[in-house]
Amino acid sequence: MICSSPDKGICLPYLYLLCYSAKFESLSVHLLHLVYQREGFAMADPPVFSLFCTSILLLSLLHLSSAADTLSSVQSIREGETLVSPGRKFELGFFSAGSSKNSFLGIWPMVSPETVVWVANRNSPLTDSNGTLEISNEGELVLLNRSKSIIWSTNSTKVFRNPVAQLLDSGNLVLREHSSSDSAYYSWQSFDYPSDTVLVGMTVGWNFRTRLEHRLTSWRSMDDPSPGDYACRYKIDALPQIEIVSNDSVKVFRTGPWNGVRFGRMSRGPTTVVKPIFVYNGTDAYFAIETKGDITAKVTLNPDGVLQCLLLKNGSTKWDLRYTVPYDPCDRYGHCGANGMCRVNQSPTCLCLQGFMPKSQEEWDMLNSAGGCIRKVPLNCSRREGFMKLSQVKLPDLVDVQLFKNMSLEECRVECQKNCSCMAYANSDIREAGCLLWFGNLIDIREIESDDYDQYLFLRLPASELDSVHSLSKKLVTITVASVISGLLIVGTTLSIIWKRRMKSRGLPSGMDDIDLPLYDFATVAVATNHFSQTNKLGAGGFGSVYKGTLSTGQEVAVKRLSKYSGQGPDEFMNEVLLIARLQHRNLVGLVGCCIEGEERMLIYEYMPNKSLDYFIFDHDRSSSLAWKRRFDIVLGIARGLLYLHQDSKLQVIHRDLKTSNILLDADMNPKISDFGLARIFHGDDTEEETRRIVGTYGYMSPEYAFDGKFSVKSDVFSFGVLLLEIVSSKRNREFQHPDHHHTLLGHAWLLWSEGRAMELIDETVRASFIESQAERCIQVGLLCVQKFPEDRPTISSVILMLANEGAILPLPKEPGFFGERSSSSSDAYLVKEESNTNNVVTVTLPEGR
């Protein structure tokens, strides 16, 4: 007798539950059938049949719902069943890669199921479709095959009484106590065991407290997620550096050592949307990524050993490629062999270091430089041996090195000098003291394309090589001086002709007699900026870097140093020199002087101690320090500066790059318009021009300029309208996000205005101090300035009248430009046609398949 209860119907569900809890689901169903046969239950008996159906219903409920994010100890996942994160961002389930028939447990984005970002059983594939994921009696998450053998397990360090597994919106699978979601109580998480991909929230590196290493391992192939030939790791020798290795030992790529601020080489670096994070302290050493906006980002190590950073915008199914490493031939480890240096933009690419020659000239002639270089003259440890300074290079690999953390650079030189085996030295930390000494061959040196890379390598050379370097320098100086003297008249005449032609082509007067602009030599500017030290650096952009300096007169200045790799060339530099020198207004930044020496191009401005407008309004803490009156004064100041450019100056100037980062603030928080490298001049009755070279930041460009290349004073008015709405709201136009729609800040302002809720746009930190009528007028003027068609926008003189005159009657604005131009997938957008000389980025979109 299977059940002796008088009420046999009640016993049936109990019997089923007993069997199911013992993980014998199929047996429980079979036993139910036997009970009906042996006990003579009538299937037509309504009460009994109802309880029987209840049993079957319980059976189905105990299987996992396809929309659940959590797996309990009495549930399981089989083929075709999945966990889905609460926000439906990621999904966990079984998959087969490509043409493979093997099955794996993995995690993928919901909108891109072919892109698997984590795999559980990489080393133990299921050879059929009969895998089961469940929580064992020991509280572990286990993967069972057809014969119920464990082929993968979490092997967690904690044991919970009532464990559950949950898939989070970050893509992290966690094992936790049912009653707590605190990450401190996770007994296991998938983020601690990366496959080939890093997501936001994951790390590649070390936790020194647990000694747990996180590393990426590539797939074997696109059809096989088992561990492949390549790994990306955070390697710590004397100093940490990120490496890509093959077969766990052969280096393919390395970033260069940590210099206290960053790594020596991370191709294509950060963008406005995805930012690499590097940490090295007493408890952690890792690499991670973070993003802005509703964007999914990942860094994946491909089966061919290439590390790619890709973005998936909200609503899109295609991944956008942001950067890759290795990126160019010089990124390949040891491309030029020992004691060679790689120069990506020059021919030949490989060059032996000073004092060295190819080990095999025949191989070098055949463009095979793997054999490297050897010294021309051996070192003999004499006192006359010295060091040659190499700048803008990635430091050699940390092979056979010594690190002295508290040694100055001069002490480092002495230490290397007295050791006959020391080949080179460098400062290990650009922020403070630290010394690195190299012994033996110098491997994997390359040029770094950056003007603000402040780490130098000092190469040891014998006396004869140093003498030849000095002799060559003297000869070059002698030849140069003689050439300059003998060709002075010819060069002067040629430069005069070129100068006049260039001025004419730019639409500027060729005469410079009315411009009184001091010229500074390079040595003076270098001393003023402490030799362009990192501590003096104020910021950087597409043009290069800006440094704080103090002239010999005591005047504080900001030095804008044009990078030789910048898109802004001599034309833009000269354009800004001539314009700023001619334009004088209290709301325009003042130009103190310039430096033109060799390849150096520098502009020297008056120093603005309060940095730029975006430094304040887009930071929650700093924006609260800008009361309403201060914001309104800044708006009026910018408008007066534009009025001078458009109407009151001798030259009618269109700025073309008006944005918050180009509005500087002096000690009294007075706004000053800066950066005239892209400005254009109108002559006579000109009201509009057209160009095929569209430059500027998309969030501030007017529609007619962005799409048709047409610009006028009304283009600047549009940019001013964007600025005005950003100032009153403390929100960025292009990065604005709202849960109810996908419009930019302009579209959001228009919606609020149309619904009579314009005051909701005002930054909450100034609502206690603002004048409501004044704030409403600012929003209305801002919307008038950003109207779609230029003829609908007011002139800047009308803007000032409407802002400053309380009794002025304002027209009603029409729909703004770009109102319907952004979908949910575009949280960062830039427009670049042909080329861009601002901080914009050309985005290459490549689909990625698994």
Image: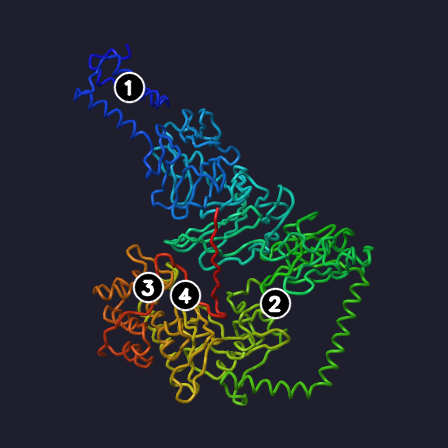
Q: Nearer the viewer, mark 4 or mark 1?
A: 1
Q: CA distance from mark 4 to mark 3?
A: 15 Å
Residue count near mark 2 (Cα–Cα under 10 Å), binned few <14, some 14–19, many ≥20: some
Whether pointer 2 and pointer 4 mark residues with C-beta atoms closer than 8 Å, the reply is no
User: Which residue position holds label 4?
Assistant: 614
Up-down relation of residue 654 to residue 410 (above or below) = below
Distance in Å between CA atoms under marks 2 and 1: 86 Å
Residue 32 circle label = 1
Could you tell me how far apart the alpha carbons at marks 2 and 4 are, in whole angstroms?
28 Å
Query: Counting residues from the N terminus, which is met first, the one under dot 3 or under dot 2?
Result: 2
Q: Which mark is residue 531?
A: 2
Q: Which residue occupies the foreground of this view, 698 or 780?
A: 698
- Which residue is denoted by mark 3 in the rendering? 745
Mark 1 residue type: Leu
Label 1 crowd bin: few (<14), some (14–19), many (20+), radius 10 Å:
some
Q: Nearer the viewer, mark 3 or mark 2?
A: 3
